Amino acid sequence: MEHGGQGWLVRVIAGGDTLRQERLTRDLHDELQKADGINAGFVEGGADVGEGRKGGLAGDVALWAAVTAAGRQTSQVLVTLIREWCARERHRKVELTVNGDSVTITGQPDEAQERIVRSFLERAAETRPDDEEKEAE
């Protein structure tokens, strides 16, 4: 996922409704495209979009997102945008994956989910400096 910056896989979960998943994914893509410091695009050509799932089917779409600036703040902006997008409709769910770690964000988060998301962001921020050091070598 070489799109500049830290790469994230973003997958809208629509309970098996492929048309709804595609519509919501496109809507989320449009929302992410408006943000400064975040690039987003569609995962191409039958990419693996999750364990036990086959990509490339109609409606089985995922996004990649890349934060273009280093640091936790830009990652927090991405997560905040997705949280706000999910909050528009309480049944929305988005799975975020970065560095092999995943979290699901819902439209009606409880305190436990908020703690999980904060922990996820901390882990994502911790792995970021190592990646930059490897690139510098």
Image (cartoon, rainbow, N blue to C red):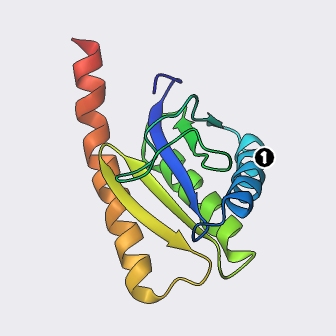
> Is 89 on the left-hand or right-hand side of 67?
right
- Residue at the extreme top: 137
Judging by the rendered image, the residue that carries numbered circle 1 is: 30
Q: Is residue 20 above or below residue 65?
A: below
**Where in the figure is residue 73, as x and y percent of width and height?**
50, 50
Type of amino acid under label 1: Asp
**Where in the figure is residue 111, as x and y percent of width and height?**
43, 87
Q: Is residue 81 above or below residue 68?
A: below
Q: Residues within 10 Å of mark 1 (few under 14, many from 20)?
A: few
**Where in the figure is residue 38, as x and y percent of width and height?**
62, 38
Residue in the foreground of this view, choosing between 47 and 117 = 47
Q: Quadrant of the C terminus?
A: top left
Residue in the foreground of this view, choosing between 135 and 26 = 26
**Where in the figure is residue 71, as x and y percent of width and height?**
43, 41
Q: Which residue is found at the position 48% from the left and 60% from the top?
A: 95
Q: Quadrant of the N terminus?
A: top left
Q: Is residue 83 above or below residue 58?
A: below
Number of callouts: 1
**Residue 34, located in which quarter of the rendered image?**
top right
SS for callout 1: helix
**Residue 133, located in which quarter of the rendered image?**
top left
Q: Which residue is found at the position 36% from the left and 57% from the top?
A: 102
Residue in the foreground of this view, choosing between 79 and 30 = 30
> Is 87 on the left-hand or right-hand side of 103?
right
